[in-house]
C-alpha cells in the first residue's frame, strides 16, 4: 500500500494513543505479541547479562508505552522518557500517576517479571518503574537538539523503540538523527534501537500512517556513518502474517551500539 509521508501536523491531529494501544498491545487483541516478546527478551538480556547500566537512561519517542522500560528500571537510577505528541505524553503521565483512565500494562509487566523469575511481584515492578521515571519531555527527532529548548546532560544510555520510522522520511534523515543523538550520550555510552524492517505503513484507529522502509544493510551502514560501534545486532522474521493490513513489516531488529570513548 502506497502511503504518502505523514506530516507532524497529521500526527498531532489524528494520532490516538488509546487506539494505538488497543490495536497493537491489548492482551489477546493486539497484533504485536511477537514484537513485544522480541523486545522484552532482548532488553532483559541487555540489562542483565549484557551489563548495560548506569545513572541515567534517556527514552526517546516512547509513544504512550512503558513496556520497554521495565527491565531498565532495575539498573538505572533515573529514567527520562519523552514523546513528540501531547496525547502520548498525557497517556504516560496518567500511567505514572495511576490515573483510573490509564492504559493497562499489567499483562506486559507480569511477562517481564516472569523473565526475571519473580512474576508474583508485578505490582512492585510497576511501582519501581514509576519511581525511576523523573521526567516526561517533549521531543522532536528532526531538531538538532531534539529536546529544544531543554538541554540535557549526556546520558549513559539512549533507548528508542518503534519511533524513528515515523519522523524520518528516508535513511539519510535517519542517519542524521543518529548523529544528533551522539550529543545526548556520554562517551562510551550506549544507544539501543529496536524496531521493524521493510514496513511502509501502520494503522491506528481509522488512519493509516507512513513508515520509513528500513533495510538491514542500510540500517547498519547508517550507524557506522553516524560514528557508532555496533556491539550487537539481532534480526528476527515476522512469523504471524495474518494482519498485514494493519502493518506490513517483515521482520524485527535490535541494534546495540556504542558512542566511542
Image (cartoon, rainbow, N blue to C red):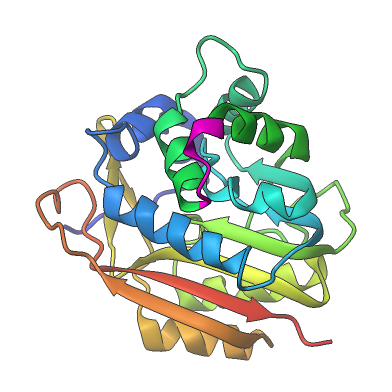
For image coordinates 52% across by 35% down, the residue present is 64
Which stretch did the figure color magenta? 116-121
Question: Is 1 left or right of 211, judged from the image as shown?
Answer: left
Against 256, is 75 above or below? above
Q: Position of residue 46 (x, y in %)?
A: 58, 68
For image coordinates 15% across by 54% down, the residue present is 244
Q: Position of residue 45 (x, y in %)?
A: 54, 66
Question: Is 49 left or right of 195, judged from the image as shown?
Answer: right
Q: Position of residue 11 (x, y in %)?
A: 46, 39
Question: Is 56 left or right of 160, judged from the image as shown?
Answer: right
Name the image quarter holding residue 184: bottom right
Judge by depth and name the residue closer to the eye, 22 or 245: 22
Residue sitting farthest toward the left:
242
Is 28 contained in the magenta span? no
For image coordinates 37% across by 73% down, the residue present is 214
Against 16, is 178 above or below? below
For image coordinates 36% across by 54% down, the residue present is 37
Judge by depth and name the residue closer to the eye, 256 or 248: 256
Q: In this view of the protein, can residue 134 be seen by the observer?
A: no
Q: Position of residue 87 (x, y in %)?
A: 55, 27
Name the image quarter holding residue 48: bottom right
Amino acid at each position: 500500500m502506497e502511503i504518502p509521508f505523514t506530516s507532524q501536523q497529521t500526527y498531532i491531529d489524528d494520532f490516538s494513543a488509546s487506539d494505538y494501544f488497543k490495536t497493537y498491545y491489548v492482551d489477546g487483541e493486539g497484533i504485536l505479541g511477537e514484537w513485544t516478546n522480541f523486545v522484552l527478551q532482548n532488553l532483559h538480556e541487555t540489562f542483565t547479562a549484557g551489563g548495560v547500566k548506569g545513572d541515567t537512561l534517556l527514552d526517546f519517542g516512547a509513544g504512550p508505552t512503558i513496556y520497554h522500560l521495565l527491565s531498565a528500571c532495575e539498573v538505572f537510577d533515573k529514567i527520562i522518557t519523552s514523546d513528540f505528541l501531547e496525547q502520548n505524553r498525557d497517556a504516560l503521565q496518567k500511567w505514572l500517576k495511576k490515573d483510573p483512565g490509564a492504559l493497562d500494562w499489567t499483562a506486559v509487566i507480569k511477562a517481564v517479571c516472569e523473565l526475571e523469575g519473580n512474576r508474583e511481584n508485578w505490582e512492585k515492578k510497576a511501582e519501581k518503574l514509576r519511581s525511576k521515571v523523573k521526567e516526561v519531555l517533549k521531543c522532536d527527532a528532526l531538531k538538532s537538539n531534539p529536546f529544544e529548548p531543554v538541554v540535557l546532560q549526556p546520558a549513559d544510555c539512549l533507548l528508542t523503540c518503534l519511533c524513528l520510522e515515523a519522523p524520518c522520511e528516508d535513511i539519510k534523515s535517519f542517519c542524521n538523527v543518529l548523529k544528533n543523538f551522539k550529543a545526548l550520550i556520554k562517551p562510551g555510552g550506549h544507544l539501543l534501537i529496536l524496531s521493524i524492517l521493510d514496513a511502509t505503513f501502520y494503522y491506528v484507529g481509522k488512519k493509516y500512517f507512513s513508515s520509513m522502509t528500513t533495510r538491514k544493510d542500510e540500517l547498519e551502514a547508517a550507524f557506522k556513518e553516524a560514528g557508532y560501534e555496533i556491539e550487537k545486532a539481532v534480526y528476527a522474521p515476522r512469523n504471524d502474517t495474518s494482519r498485514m493490513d494493519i502493518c506490513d513489516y517483515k521482520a524485527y531488529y535490535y541494534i546495540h551500539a556504542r558512542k566511542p570513548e
